[in-house]
């Protein structure tokens, strides 16, 4: 947005106008690498670093987290893409079949990534003979941090923004990236800025990560229940952010599918919190530092040898 000064406002008015909107980056790749992919990788790295710090504080081995991440991230990407393709199947109807695998262009559904990623992580933890509730408590706070960083990729792609707004932090979107929104909002002159929903969700997720760390530090929940707070917190945040979006989306009973998935996450979290406590919630079956697993033939090997998919 150009800087405009007035006789009364002087320099102050000029500065205010200069920062009256968030500009969108004019590029979304660095050489052969997309910013979208780099942000996802950076988010994963941050989550793994935090997870290793928390796991070793419990007496675990940081290599356990790396091994679990291989499974969780791989499964999460598959799940996120599957969710996107299923919920936006009409976008691929007239496209070549290989476009389903075109991850460089974006298109990852977070709910699918959460589901597959958590299941993949649980599988890897069990395969290593680790105490799953303790693993979940150690790793869950890193998930919203990874999501917050990953959302920056949507900014570079100029996608997933909300309805028009004249708020000072409105997001500028160029004409080329307005093709997927309703035609009534495509005029750059009439609607210069939109709600930066990527920023809203990123800030919300950072707040959620802080909440998870605070609750865990206070010891308010039985072992393995921290994931419930994550489900509830992310579900609520995603719901109100989703309500701001205007890009086309499939609906069920008049509501976007992602709104229903947000509701499912909240309900799932409440069910986990309300689930009766048991001895499993308080005493681990194995210590967090358990480093051997038993293979099908009875042989026991170190967990380092069992982390490859």
Image: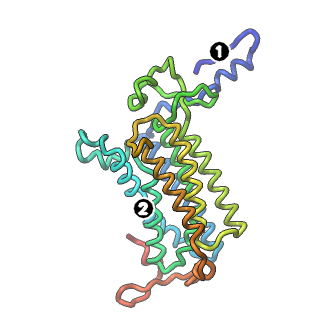
Crowding at dot 2, Cα within 10 Å, few <14 / some 14-19 / many 20+, comes out as many
Residue to which mark 1 is pinned? 4
Q: Secondary structure at mark 1?
A: loop
Residue lying furthest front: 253
Q: Identify which residue is drawn at 46% across, 24% down.
A: 185
Picture quadrant of residue 178:
top left
Mark-to-mark CA distance, 2 and 1: 50 Å
Q: Secondary structure at mark 2?
A: helix
- The answer to whether 137 is drawn above or below residue 114 in the figure is below
Crowding at dot 1, Cα within 10 Å, few <14 / some 14-19 / many 20+, comes out as some
Q: Where is the N terminus found, in terms of image quarters?
A: top right
- The answer to whether 264 is drawn above or below residue 222 in the figure is above
Q: Position of residue 5 (x, y in %)?
A: 69, 13
Image coloring type: rainbow
Residue to which mark 2 is pinned? 116
Which is nearer the eye, 179 or 268?
A: 268
Q: Position of residue 15 (x, y in %)?
A: 69, 22
Q: Nearer the viewer, mark 2 or mark 1?
A: 2
Badge 2 or badge 1: first in the primary sequence:
1
């Amino acid at each position: 947005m150009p800087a405009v000064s007035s006789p009364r406002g002087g320099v102050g008015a000029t500065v205010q106008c200069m920062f009256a909107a968030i500009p969108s980056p004019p590029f979304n790749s660095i050489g052969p690498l997309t910013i979208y992919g780099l942000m996802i990788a950076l988010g994963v790295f941050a989550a793994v670093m935090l997870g290793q710090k928390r796991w070793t504080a419990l007496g675990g081995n940081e290599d356990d987290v790396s091994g679990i991440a291989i499974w969780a991230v791989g499964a999460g990407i598959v799940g996120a893409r599957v969710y996107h393709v299923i919920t936006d199947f009409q976008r691929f109807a007239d496209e070549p079949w290989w476009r389903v695998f075109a991850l460089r262009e974006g298109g990852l559904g977070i709910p699918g990534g959460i589901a597959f990623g958590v299941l993949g992580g649980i599988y890897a933890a069990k395969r290593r003979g680790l105490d799953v509730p303790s693993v979940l408590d150690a790793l869950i706070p890193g998930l919203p941090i990874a999501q917050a960083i990953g959302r920056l990729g949507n900014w570079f792609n100029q996608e997933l923004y909300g309805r028009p707004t004249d708020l000072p932090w409105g997001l500028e979107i160029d004409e080329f990236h307005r093709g997927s929104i309703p035609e009534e909002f495509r005029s750059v002159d009439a609607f210069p800025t939109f709600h930066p929903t990527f920023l809203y969700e990123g800030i919300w997720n950072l707040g959620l990560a802080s909440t998870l760390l605070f609750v865990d530090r206070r010891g308010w929940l039985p072992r393995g229940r921290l994931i419930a707070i994550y489900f509830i917190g992310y579900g609520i945040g995603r719901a109100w952010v989703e309500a701001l979006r205007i890009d086309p989306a499939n609906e069920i009973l008049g509501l976007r599918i992602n709104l229903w998935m947000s509701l499912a996450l909240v309900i799932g979290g409440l069910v986990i919190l309300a689930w009766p406590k048991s001895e499993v919630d308080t005493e681990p079956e194995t210590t967090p530092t358990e480093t051997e697993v038993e293979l099908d033939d009875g042989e026991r090997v170190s967990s380092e040898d069992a982390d490859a998919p």
